[in-house]
Amino acid sequence: MRTSILGATVALALVTGSATASEGPKLAAQNWSFGGIFGTFDRATLRRGVQVYNEVCASCHSLKLVAYRNLGDVGYGAEEVKAIAAEFEVTDGPNDDGDMFTRPALPADRFAAPFENDKAARAANNGALPPDLSVITKARKGGSDYIYALLSRYAEDPPADFELSDGMYYNEVFPGHQIAMSPPLGEDAVEYADGTKATTAQMSKDVTTFLVWAAEPEMEERKRLGIIVMIFLTALTAMLYALKRMIWSDLH
């Protein structure tokens, strides 16, 4: 199922209001499984995040730096990856006649782009260009906490003293509070394959976790290497200290 929602997920830069307006309330720090030096990605959360992206976000937002085969690192098997990729079409060619053609995506393909080009994307979104989400969590101050807050803190009605421009939506954390993306997530917008209740907060957290992984798929390996290096340096320091004590023991 693909839910066609104007703006889909995280159109973080689509605003016509003043960029110098209020920065919004302080972001609440969320408890992320990948936080801290020992943090790792929760695979069940990642899989739900993939589902939210494919069913909601992919209709407007690209993920140009991620290939379908990378989903194997999320916990999908080879056949599952093939099935997910086959749900989308990509442009290929030219064929023997010199023409471009479309075909079902393969695991080796990058995530299918929803539009042919930026002009087509703007034409479909009232002039706004939905950003690519490949590194969106690294490109926005506040990272994962900001993405989560942006997705989950729309207000149906703005404050009485706030003038909302036509075609804009009120968001509590977006600078200026006016955003061109309609609320992308609503209760039960998707039906999770694992039976998890699809609340707005749950979907926001799941897709945010997936986008963090998309931006830093090497995070877990980097942390493991860092821990190994720290252990090695600690052991080396202890050995050098013991050697120093042995060499200089006659002077004490």
Image (tube, helix red, strand yellow):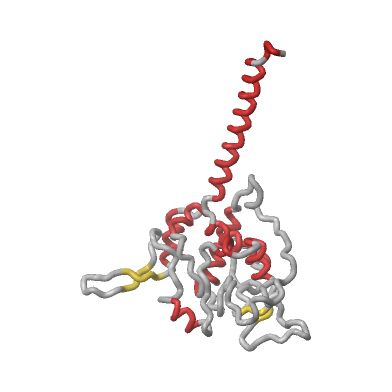
In this rendering, the answer to whether 69 lies above or below 119 is: above
Say left or right for 97 vs 110: left
Q: Residue at x 47, y 79 (%)?
A: 121
Q: Residue at x 53, y 62 (%)?
A: 135
Where is residue 112, by image quadrant? bottom left
| Residue at image location 67% in from the left, 18% down from the top | 245
- Residue reaching furthest to the bottom: 166
In this rendering, is residue 234 above or below 217? above
Q: Residue furthest front?
A: 251
Q: 252 left or right of 181? A: right
Residue 178: percent from left, percent from top: 66, 79
Question: Residue 103 occupies which quadrant of the picture?
Answer: bottom left
Residue 1 visible in the picture:
no
Q: Residue 25 location, x and y as percent? A: 74, 69
The reply to whether residue 198 is in sight is yes
Determine the residue located farthest toward the right in the rendered image: 160
